[in-house]
Image (cartoon, grey):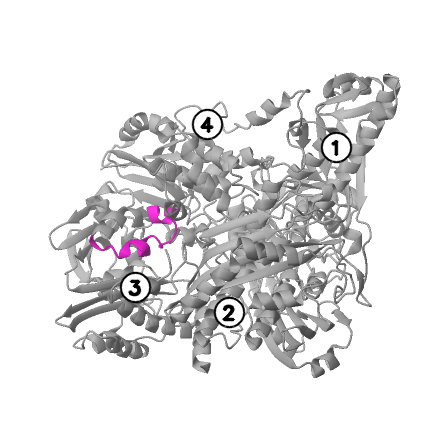
């Protein structure tokens, strides 16, 4: 197969082709340094402040969808076959402000102004999707944007008012939608892309089969989906990740299949991409899911990546383990499956071989006799890494607990089931006393560590208390058990 | 990067005048009022540039060909002798031009802002905190410099270290700057004879500024000894003087420019000096433009923050909860050098009374040296750490006496004609705290809501509620009296357009807008006629930091003075030209009326120019009435006080310690506001920032002395979803400054920061409910969910 050696994308409506792209080149540096598009700012270089928010549009099954992303940790090579939109593209050539911009001016949404272009871009993405958002939707859309001056109130007001200043139908990206769709389709030549700059190499396989082949050829390659973790290896640890193999562009890995008893997610499904289907089958996950990072990270990051990187504090593994999910690992044409919990061997060590990759996740659909919950405890409610994450799946028949799967993150070197606590529950009457006993058994399961997110004592105490919360919540939705959303 | 752009290159140069300004320029006499005068809502002058991304920050300035990039090499020990610093690998790294160490500094290796000579740019014999700069590397790209900076081979000999004020006192680390004592009466005997006494300790964490734009300096060498430094500093004059000091050249060789900052909050008052100096030294050494911009991790590791305090307090009071005596020891984590720790710890004592009268009082500061980054200015400048102790004392008394803490507060307010003398012997002449609190109590429906909270908690559920109404009184003026001066430069060009420059810097607070409003009002022209220009040491010399909330008070007055000077000349000219009395000349909106004749402003200016009238003036202002004798602890350090109050209600999950701010009501005093919408933005933003300080923002050092919360991933400032679910913010519209400040307004930057204490106190109230309000929870700050849960458990265990 002949590989293409450049990336081709559209930047603010103009076609661009780039050769000589390093594995570690970031979109932000490209925009600011190479293109002098300085409206996009660097605030943290780790995807946490949103000052670098841009929109990236890509064809997914023929549909053009724009999503907000953090340019600071988005790797340049992954722009292939995308339309990149920066703040400079928003106001018309005659200088007329975009409705979102006008609303920000009218409502005094900027003070120092440094975070402002990022807010404008997030609000723009929201406005295109939901012209009349609720306050909750606005807050969720700007979880990934920090403002240190305004206290946010005027930004919320601007978000509410944007649609009054103009309708999405008149928006440039919507007017150009068909033309851009056609142009992106033209760029989609189905080729593998092999990039290099000096010794640094990046590969975008043409298909999942091609990905399997590339990994056989490049057993030491760094596999990258959303780069929400690997991006920080680059920007914070200055690590060389070459050769890097990207998979985020592969539609095949973004497939979601629902059968009678199973939900199968391709490894490339993002947090955002999985939200609707997950919340349909597991409605209790809605609040939890919206507390994973900020919008930009949720559009970039994948569940597969969250599992594959083996972090003890990823938000999805406890949930997947409690649900009895399996992963499909593939090497060449050989596949094996294993329960998610067995994948994590120790800190930084997973059951994955060279050239092998996580291809899909399979989540059994819930049975009616199961009580579920997922809890995230963090210093800040939103866009924070868990101090403790916990997921419960407890099955009850005739007043007796006959199965319990309870998994924790942040309590050990890996995401892990609470075996002793589960044992205390299984076979017991479904009563508060059983949960008290299970909580008391938790120190047999975990010896959590103390770090900047939480102390060992707090992690243990709050985890034990979550058994009480779980019990209370199964007893008929007493509103006083939870804080208002 | 090979760039084979298919179509024409993108036109990135879309910078053009905002259409709004062009529109406003065509303004016209005959209006009843000018557009953009004082006491009116007006958008930030850069609002359109902000939202379009066209506002230029330091890193956006086009770089001259050959621009180099510097990066700091930081220590990885909290306290150690440097046995060897081997930079050969750094120098040999790709694209490196060279390195800078203390040996390369032509002048003095020091950027101590108070002249104590205790803050080297580059450590030489020893390092005194983890993250202390030891060298800089200069390369052709920032990436190359940053990579090279990690290649130094350093041999350390470890020394014992102390990270916090308690450990520092135990280790006898000493003070970084002389301590202060404020005393009045005889606190000791008043305490002994008081019917009740309580002793306690309050730990208050520090705070990182987390300005969205980090530190940055960009130096361009000139001829002779000259250098121009573009930077993001709140204190261009000090940066100028420091660069000169470090280069060993006179100040007149150095120009510092600041168009705007992406946030400052005090973090760029002194902390930018080092970056300016390194960029300037490198620029002169290699005769090329040099930029330095640390990564966020390094910014947070290597630059100072709000001081953490450990405060031991004692209060004596009577059965009614009236205070008889207060004593307090305020130990601060100052870091390895003095920086601004002297005035910061002083201000903590100045505000340890908040709005309350202490009949007998003794307050001591302990500015402890610690092996941490040198702490610095941060909105409130020590004041918040004083105010929070006063509020803790109110809480202690309330729980002890079984009273509503608001009632205790009211009983202890300063009086108007008596009980009105502060611990530093200044008379409180403008006390409006009782009125502000009474109005807020009514508008927030405090009593009914407090009863509802008590009823809710009486049910004994998992979710508990708390409510608190706390006031703030904040002293306005730099306590360094000589800082209370300002200059401005005003030109009117012969076409009638106006160029305004002043010594203040714009960091988002809308200072430039407010000062332009003052000039517009004085000359009665639409604000669009006035061009706001970058702050530069070339135009206004010897300026003070834009700090202490003083920006518009000082610079507004200086600009007004400049406008009045020109106006006086114009009036004299008009009287002569139109042969009339000077009192017949009137500046009307966008015109000048001379007798019965009305001349459009531009035409009038043209005539004045033709008549050779001097159309430029340098204005000046110094704050009257203030004086301060630190040795005796007596004086009038503050020109006036700004007041405010906030009422917050929270819900707390007693299983996890998580919480929600359900509602906050604020009534804040800004005197007669120059620009109410901008002031309201300051109040809202300060409240949220103050709330963040006391809730989720936690600085955490590991056992090696390394700060582990060094970026937004680990250091959590409030998000939109953390703001109160209901948020009512009002300015006290009736308030006018009794002092002759600019248009009778009051400073606004810092005072509302302390309104965040209402959230902290409300959390405490909710926690107290688990022990039926019999005990003061003594919550420490920041009240993270962990601290809240642990306080709940502690209270429950104590039964």
Q: Mark 3 points at which residue?
A: A478
The chain carrying label 3 is A
The magenta-colored residue range is A281-300
Can you see residue A476? yes
Q: In which quarter of the image is the C terminus of chain B?
A: bottom left
How crowded pointer 4 is (Cα within 10 Å; few <14, some 14-19, many 20+) is rated as some
The residue labelled by disc 2 is B702
Magenta span: helix, strand or loop, mainly? Answer: helix
Q: On residue B522, which mark appears?
A: 1
> Mark 2 falls on what kind of element?
loop
Numbered disc 2: what chain? Answer: B
Residue A136, which numbered label? Answer: none
Tag in front: 2 or 1: 1
Residue A340 spot, x, y in % from top left: 23, 62
Can you say whether B795 is above or below B155 in the image? below
- On whether disc 1 and disc 4 are found on a single subunit, the reply is yes
Measure the alpha-carbon separation of dots 4 and 3. 58 Å
Sequence-wise first label, 2 or 1:
1
Between marks 2 and 1, how big is the CA–CA gap?
56 Å
In screen coordinates, is A66 left or right of B596?
Answer: left
Q: Residues within 10 Å of mark 1 (few under 14, many from 20)?
A: some
Give the crowd class for mark 2: few <14, some 14-19, many >=20 residues within 10 Å: few
Residues tagged 2 and 4 counted as in contact (Cβ below 8 A)? no
């Amino acid at each position: 197969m002949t590989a293409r050696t450049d990336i081709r994308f559209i930047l603010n409506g103009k076609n661009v082709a780039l050769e000589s792209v390093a594995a570690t080149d970031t979109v932000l540096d490209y925009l600011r340094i190479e293109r002098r598009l300085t409206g996009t700012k660097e605030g943290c270089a780790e995807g946490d402040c949103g000052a670098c928010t841009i929109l990236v549009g890509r064809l997914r099954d023929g549909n053009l969808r724009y999503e907000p992303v953090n340019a600071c940790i988005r790797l340049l090579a992954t722009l292939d076959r995308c339309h990149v939109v920066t703040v400079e593209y928003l106001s018309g050539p005659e200088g007329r402000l975009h409705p979102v911009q006008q609303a920000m001016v009218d409502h005094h949404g900027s003070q120092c102004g440094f975070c402002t272009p990022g807010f404008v871009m997030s609000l723009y993405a929201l406005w295109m999707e939901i012209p009349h958002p609720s306050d909750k939707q606005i807050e969720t859309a700007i979880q990934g944007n920090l403002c240190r001056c305004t206290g946010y109130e005027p930004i919320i007001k601007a978000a509410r008012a944007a649609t009054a200043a103009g309708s999405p139908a008149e928006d440039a990206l919507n007017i150009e939608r068909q033309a851009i769709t056609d142009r992106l389709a033209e760029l989609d030549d189905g080729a593998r892309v092999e990039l290099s700059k000096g010794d640094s190499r990046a590969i975008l396989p043409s298909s999942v089969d091609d990905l399997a082949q590339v990994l056989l050829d490049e057993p030491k390659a760094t596999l990258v989906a959303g780069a929400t973790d690997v991006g920080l290896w680059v920007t914070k640890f200055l690590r060389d990740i070459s050769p890097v193999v990207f998979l985020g562009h592969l539609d095949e890995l973004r497939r979601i299949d629902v059968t009678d008893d199973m939900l199968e997610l391709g490894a490339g499904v993002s947090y955002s991409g999985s939200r609707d289907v997950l919340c349909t089958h597991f409605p209790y996950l809605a609040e939890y899911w919206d507390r994973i990072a900020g919008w930009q990270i949720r559009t970039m990051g994948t569940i597969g990546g969250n599992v594959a990187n083996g972090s003890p504090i990823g938000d999805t593994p406890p949930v997947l383990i409690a649900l009895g999910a399996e992963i499909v690992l593939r090497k060449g044409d050989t596949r094996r499956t294993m329960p998610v919990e067995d994948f994590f061997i120790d800190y930084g060590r997973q059951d994955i071989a060279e050239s092998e990759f996580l291809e899909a996740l399979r989540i059994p659909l819930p049975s009616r006799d199961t009580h579920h919950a997922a809890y995230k405890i963090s210093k800040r409610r939103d866009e924070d890494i868990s101090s403790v994450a916990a997921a419960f799946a407890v099955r009850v028949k005739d007043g007796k607990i006959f199965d319990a799967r309870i998994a924790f993150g942040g309590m050990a070197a890996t995401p892990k089931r609470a075996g002793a606590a589960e044992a205390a529950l299984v076979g017991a009457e479904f009563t508060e006393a059983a949960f008290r006993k299970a909580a008391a058994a938790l120190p047999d399961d975990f010896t959590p560590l103390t770090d900047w997110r939480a102390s060992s004592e707090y992690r243990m105490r709050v985890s034990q208390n979550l058994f009480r919360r779980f019990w209370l919540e199964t007893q008929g939705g007493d509103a006083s058990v939870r804080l208002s959303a | 990067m090979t760039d084979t752009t298919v179509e024409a290159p993108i036109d990135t140069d879309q910078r053009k005048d905002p259409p709004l300004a062009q529109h406003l320029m065509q303004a016209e006499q005959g209006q009843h009022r000018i557009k953009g005068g004082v006491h009116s809502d007006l958008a930030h002058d850069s609002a359109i540039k902000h939202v379009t991304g066209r506002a230029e920050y330091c890193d956006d300035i086009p770089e001259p060909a050959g621009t180099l990039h510097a990066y700091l090499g930081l220590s990885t020990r909290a306290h150690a002798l440097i046995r060897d610093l081997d930079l050969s690998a750094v120098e040999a790294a790709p694209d490196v031009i060279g390195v800078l160490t203390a040996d390369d500094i032509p002048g003095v290796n020091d950027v101590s802002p108070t002249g104590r000579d205790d803050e080297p740019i580059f450590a030489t014999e020893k390092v005194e905190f983890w993250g202390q700069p030891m060298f800089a590397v200069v390369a052709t790209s920032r990436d190359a410099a940053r990579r090279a900076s990690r290649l130094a081979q350093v041999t350390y000999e470890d020394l014992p270290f102390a990270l916090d004020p308690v450990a520092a006192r135990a280790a006898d680390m000493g003070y970084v700057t002389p301590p202060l004592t404020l005393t009045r009466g005889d606190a000791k005997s008043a305490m002994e004879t008081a019917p009740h006494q309580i002793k306690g300790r309050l730990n208050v964490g520090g705070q990182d500024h987390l300005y969205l734009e980090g530190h940055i300096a960009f130096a361009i060498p000139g001829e002779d000894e000259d250098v121009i430094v573009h930077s993001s500093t709140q204190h261009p004059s000090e940066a100028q003087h420091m660069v000169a000091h470090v280069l060993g050249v006179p100040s007149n060789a150095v120009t510092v420019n600041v168009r705007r900052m992406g946030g400052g909050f005090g973090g760029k008052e002194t902390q930018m000096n080092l970056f300016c100096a390194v960029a300037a030294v490198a620029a002169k050494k290699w005769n090329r433009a040099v930029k330095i911009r640390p990564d966020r991790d390094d910014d947070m590791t290597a630059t100072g923050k709000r001081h953490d305090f450990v405060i031991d307090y004692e209060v004596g009071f009577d059965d009614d909860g009236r205070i008889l005596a207060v004593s307090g020891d305020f130990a601060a984590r100052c870091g390895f050098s003095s920086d601004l720790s002297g005035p910061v710890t002083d201000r903590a004592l100045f505000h340890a009374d908040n709005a309350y009268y202490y009949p007998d009082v003794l307050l001591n500061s302990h500015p402890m040296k610690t092996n941490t980054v040198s702490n610095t200015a941060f909105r409130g400048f020590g004041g918040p750490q004083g105010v929070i102790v006063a509020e803790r004392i109110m809480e202690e008394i309330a729980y002890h006496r079984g009273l509503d803490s608001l009632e205790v507060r009211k009983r202890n307010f300063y009086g108007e004609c008596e009980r009105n003398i502060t611990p530093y012997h200044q008379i409180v002449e403008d006390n409006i705290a009782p009125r502000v609190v009474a109005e807020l109590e009514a508008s927030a429906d405090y009593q009914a809501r407090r009863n509802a909270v008590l009823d809710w908690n009486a049910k004994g559920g998992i979710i508990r509620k708390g409510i608190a109404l706390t006031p703030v009184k904040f002293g306005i003026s730099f306590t360094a009296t000589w800082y209370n001066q300002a200059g401005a430069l005003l030109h009117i060009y012969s076409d009638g357009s106006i160029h305004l420059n002043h010594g203040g810097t714009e960091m988002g607070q809308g200072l430039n807008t407010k000062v332009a409003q003052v000039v517009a009002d004085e000359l009665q022209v639409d604000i669009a006629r006035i061009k706001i220009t970058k702050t530069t040491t070339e135009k206004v010399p010897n300026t003070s930091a834009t700090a202490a909330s003083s920006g518009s008070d000082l610079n507004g007055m200086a600009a007004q003075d400049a406008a009045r000077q020109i106006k006086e000349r114009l009036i004299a000219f008009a009287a002569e030209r139109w042969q009339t009395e000077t009192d017949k000349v009137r500046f009307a909106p966008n015109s000048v009326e001379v007798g019965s004749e009305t001349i459009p402003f531009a035409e009038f200016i043209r005539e004045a120019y033709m008549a050779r009238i001097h159309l430029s003036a340098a204005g000046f202002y110094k704050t009257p009435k203030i004086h301060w004798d630190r040795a005796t602890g007596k004086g009038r350090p503050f020109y006036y006080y700004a007041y405010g109050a906030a009422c917050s209600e929270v819900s707390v999950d007693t299983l996890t310690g998580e919480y929600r701010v359900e509602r906050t009501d604020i009534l804040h005093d800004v005197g007669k506001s120059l620009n109410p919408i901008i002031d309201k933005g300051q109040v809202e933003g300060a409240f949220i920032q103050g709330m963040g300080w006391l809730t989720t923002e936690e600085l955490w050092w590991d056992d090696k002395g390394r700060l582990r919360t060094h970026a937004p991933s680990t250091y959590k400032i409030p998000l939109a979803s953390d703001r109160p679910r209901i948020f009512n913010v009002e300015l006290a519209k009736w308030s006018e400054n009794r002092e002759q400040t600019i248009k009778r307004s009051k400073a606004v930057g810092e005072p509302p920061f302390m309104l965040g204490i209402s959230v902290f106190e409300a959390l405490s109230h909710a926690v107290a409910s688990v022990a039926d309000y019999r005990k003061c929870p003594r919550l420490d700050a920041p009240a993270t969910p962990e601290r809240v849960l642990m306080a709940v458990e502690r209270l429950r265990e104590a039964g």
